[in-house]
Amino acid sequence: MAEPEPTPESEAALARASEWGIHTIPAPTPFAVGRVNCYLIEGDPLTLIDAGPRSEKSWEGLKSGVEAAGYGIEDIDLVVATHQHIDHIGGISSVVEVSGADVAAIDISVDRLAKFSWGSEKEDQMAVDLMVRYGVKEDVANVLKEVTASFRELGAPVEVTRPFSAGSKITMGSREYEIFHRPGHSPSDTVFWDRDRQLMFGGDHLLSHISSNPLISQSLDGSGERTKSLINYRDSLKATAAMPVEIMLSGHGLAITDHADLIRRRLAGQDRRTEKIYDLVAEGHSSPHGVASAIWGDIALTQAYLTLSEVIGHLDILISDGRVVEHEGERYSTFEAVG
């Protein structure tokens, strides 16, 4: 996936952030989304937001970016995680090994980050079970599980020494930021808000060039239930749209200067997709994978769970609205339009 070309507005936003001592450090990843944006915030404590995946290329990119800002990895006092995905938290343990920095993350993610391998295995098995239940062939689901497991070396356990709660505040680089929980893309998505500067660190909550995939995950409440990711994500987007954000520094892509309009467009696109999926179910496509195939055609192996997550998210909305029902069998589920 090609990364977006900078715009005058995004360049001006980064220049303004740089004047405030906020340095954007793009770290390479092997994923289609491209480089992850890490942020070094000058002041006390010298703070790094996210650290890229655990790989040599990412480490060198992170190290070079920190040095270009006039510091070394060993100078970092605090590392803050925006959410649980490996392209953001994989390198945190390496930073801590060099710097001895504290690690801050939302309290509900502490156990998940500490038990990285165990949590990843549970997520992978849940994905297999979900894919088989919703129409993906079992052998395909198991192959995808093996592919996903091969990326696990890009992550590592993270010991959170400074857990925080939603609604609290955190000092990063000598400034106080308000903390908001914005689940959807992941269950632990967290954004950080400088009210005076109207600046937000958004992680993957909102991206400039692509819609953040509301990936179905295991809930972090210990119930073992799956998240209703798209429903949660839409609620989160609406809450963020109501805030007077002038600059959002995101986890990938460009700085965002039109967040409310971008969110409006994303929500409208989701509404259209919900209606498309309703029509397909009404036409007789009873399995989520069948719906996904009707929309995207021959789906690449690596995209099977992403597309299935999207379809299930829209079906969750339709079920909530009373327009579709799910018929749960012993191993498989089918869906029927009733509205």
Image: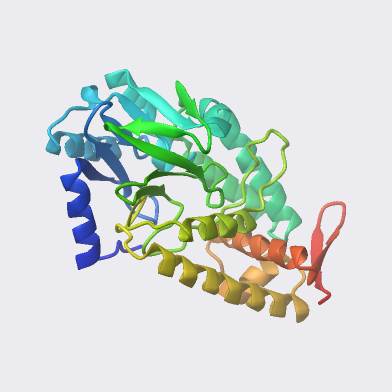
Q: In this view of the protein, which residue sits in the foreground, 4 or 254? A: 254
In this picture, residue 60 sits left or right of residue 52: left
State the image coordinates of residue 39 (x, y, percent, origin top left): 28, 41
Q: Please report the residue visible at 15 percent of the width from the left and 34 percent of the height from the top.
A: 67
Up/down of 1 relative to 272, above or below: above
State the image coordinates of residue 271 (x, y, percent, origin top left): 60, 73
State the image coordinates of residue 28 (x, y, percent, origin top left): 29, 46
Name the image quarter holding the C terminus: bottom right
Q: Please report the residue visible at 87 percent of the width from the left and 52 percent of the height from the top.
A: 330
Within the image, what quadrant is residue 4 found in?
bottom left
In this picture, residue 17 sits left or right of residue 327: left
Within the image, what quadrant is residue 210 found in?
bottom left
Number of marks in picture: 0
Q: Please report the residue visible at 39 percent of the width from the left and 56 percent of the height from the top.
A: 32
Q: Please report the residue visible at 61 percent of the width from the left and 58 percent of the height from the top.
A: 230
Q: In this view of the protein, which residue sits in the foreground, 217 or 245? A: 245
Confirm whether residue 160 shows in the render: no
Within the image, what quadrant is residue 55 found in?
top left
State the image coordinates of residue 59 (x, y, percent, origin top left): 27, 35
Residue farthest along the front direction in this orientation = 196
Up/down of 63 relative to 330, above or below: above
